[in-house]
Amino acid sequence: MVGIALGLLLFGGHALAVSPKIPLTDTEKRWLSEHPVIRVGVGVAFPPYMWVEKDQGRPHRFQGMVADYLDVIERRLGVEMNIVYDIPFNEALMRGRRGDIDFFPCLSNTPDRAEYLLFTAPYLTYPLVIITRENVPDIQNINDLAGKRIAVVKHLFVYGILKRDYGHLKLNYRYSNTVDENLDAVSLGRADACFVNLAAASYFIQKKGLTNLRIAAPIDWKGVSLSMAVRKDWPIFRSIIEKALSSIAQEERDDISRKWIRVDLAAGTPTDLVWKWGGAAAIAVGILLGFFITWNRRLQKEIREKEKAETALNQSRKKLTTLVGNLPGVAYRCVNDENWTMLYLSDGCYELTGYHSSELVGSSQLPWNDLIIPEDRPLVRDQVQTALENEQAFTMEYRIRHRDGSERWVWEKGMPQGSDEKGRKILEGFINDISDLKAAEMKRKSLESQLRHAHKMEAVGTLAGGIAHEFNNILGIILGNSELALDDVQDGHPAVVSLEEIRTASIRGKDVVRQLLSFSRDSTLEKRKINLGALVTETLGFLKASIPADIQFSKMIAPDAYTVTADPSQIRQVIVNLCTNAAQAMGPEGGFIDIRVENVRIDSQQVFADQLILPGNYLKLAVTDSGSGIPNQVLNKVFHPFYTTREVNEGAGMGLAVAHGIMKNHDGFISIQSRPGRGTEISCLFPPETKPGSGDDAAPVADQETKPPVKGPDDGNILFVDDESALAAMGKKQLERQGYKVAVFTNPVAAVDAFRADPGYWDLLITDYSMPVMNGSQVIHHVKSQRPGIPVILCSGHDPSITPSSLKDMGADHYLMKPFESDVLARTVKDALLKKDSPNTRMP
């Protein structure tokens, strides 16, 4: 009986109230009949105003003050309010913008939302307050929070006002997903304060027992003003909702507020009404009051004990938080589900991922699994599941995607920690950024690869140098004897064709050896005038053998191209690197590479790559490919040593860097132009040396080799020294057919003795360089000591130590690289006897 009386006393007004009639127009009534079902968006959990209770096996329940208002309106209008559950607040707003949600029963009116929603007048208003811990120094107003840690929810209007109007306070934001998480952050010391409306603060503080929190100060904003909102193309429905709200009497509104926000019953209880129910009721109330007094004292004792325990717990948590926060990396606790749903992440999360822990903890929109690079997800999944099956710890390395788009390597160690109340397996562990270690490891491997490659090339160079001399001697014998045989047979003889083939093959073999030596030698050659077009032609002939057949070459060499002063072997290396780089840019379907050599005029000062180029004339070498192109963001890195976008074992990233260095050493310039999907063009500019058509290499080697023999005088006495008897005999025949008198020696000591016997008899010394007992340099020394002015021709199959300066030091006037044709020998001998420098001198 007492319970019934109290129920009538507290809620009688609402229970006995008769639903008033809402004054709707005929148009509004007709509209309601045409729209019997209204789609309602609730989104964010916002106790005590509204939230959704989800119990396993039971339907969702919309709860709170707003739910009670919505229930009254639904009954009075006779429509079905169909609540759209299980979507985040932002998604609900997006659906409202699209017109997929018709009605929001609780929403703050903002300029952005007003663009697509119509708002009623506010029907719920509560002031905002600053909540702090009891041990935080006095805070009188918002300005006292300068520099402090403030817990906020990003999508709520409080955060927007703070960012807009209070940036000068330099607040240190701690992001949460919900209002009650803000209160937790303040209670546990992760934040110093938060801004909460008084109703929500009262509800959560009582519900969670957060006894160490207090209201520090009110905020002089307008507080929480909540309205109902309808889609913008339904103004008639807003009118209907406003009339329905007006029909709810103040007494009903008070009942709803008292239901969800606790107040002190003693402060508002009309005791005279209690006593009028009679003595029995008074006695019952007295018994109840006595019970409440006793229970209250016991509760106060329990609260004090709880506060003491919470103080100790908070101190322990603070120590643990400080310890974890000072560790490099991230401590975590997560669920073993498909998303690796995070239950806890330490403060290092932001530095590692670019996201605050509040953005990842409990998030279905941004789960940890989405941060893992897709290729690494199976590895992570397999290792964790294996550890769970064996109930043991696990360690692994994998990659994640940082918020800025970069890849980060991480090392993770974790272990199973039982199950939660829902039966889900729980993992705890630690994740650390090892990107720098990985980069150092990759660089070390790249350097080791480069070192292996350098050793390999050194071995190739040693091998090539070792066999070049002997192989060139063999080629010289074949070439020379084929030319002697051609002189012995008449035109039209069947053997002429075969002999010409032998001669041509020998010349090709000579070119192959020369090119191989140019790539393998480690000596630095001096610069000289060269014809770049001829060098390109020669290099392409060598390159085509190593480039896939489905890549087509084209070239355009301007006939008036300038000559340049350069080291031929280094410029050849530039051509090879550029063409190889272009070939590697092609896909399996192949493509084309175009090489152009032409004169260009720069009319104004320009920045070309990383150098300043002045106006003037230049020779341009351009290599263009039809490959995939290079993204703009990496164009400025392609000339960096070891930079490459290719897979491991597909290039070490040194080709373009080497080309860049060579061009700088030649006072030239290199630049790159590329667009993804459009191919790439790399251009090199050389300062010109002379007018077109001059230079040591002005014509290809083959052009020199096809000049007609030059007859010399018949009064020259030549001392010919070569330890290869076949070459010595062949040289003797070739020179005697030119009219010279030739004495051949295969023993250099005997040759020197013969010269000493009559120094004045000899007009010319031709000597090989690499010989047993006495080399060519020693032979020249002994001969020149007897007769300093005698001309000398030095021959060699290959020796990297022979340079123009070393030839001068030895006293050699001319140099012939074996094998050489008879006409080249004849011209060189004639020039030597006439004391002229030979234009046919071939350097290594």
Image (cartoon, grey):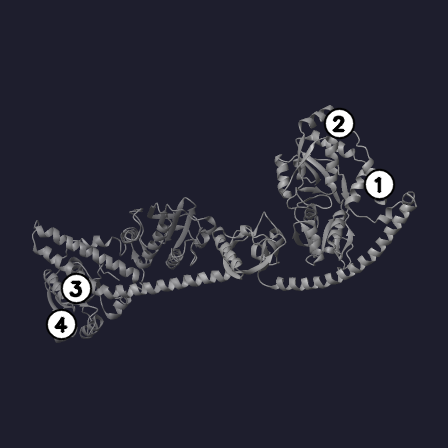
Q: Which labelled disc corresponds to residue 833?
A: 3
- Pointer 1 with pointer 4, Cβ within 8 A: no
Callout 3 crowding tier (Cα within 10 Å): few <14, some 14–19, many ≥20: some
- Pointer 1 with pointer 2, Cβ within 8 A: no
Q: Which residue is mark 1?
A: 8
Q: Position of residue 80 (x, y in %)?
A: 69, 33
Compute the Cα span from label 1 to label 2. Answer: 32 Å
- Where disc 2 sits, the SS reads loop
Q: Which labelled disc corresponds to residue 24?
A: 2
Q: Earlier in the sequence, mark 3 or mark 2?
A: 2
Callout 1 crowding tier (Cα within 10 Å): few <14, some 14–19, many ≥20: some
Instruction: Kindly identify the amino acid type of the residue bearing the numbered disc 4.
Output: Gly
- Where disc 3 sits, the SS reads helix
Q: Nearer the viewer, mark 1 or mark 2?
A: 1
For the question of whether residue 742 can be seen, the reply is: yes
* Nearer to the camera, 579 or 425: 425
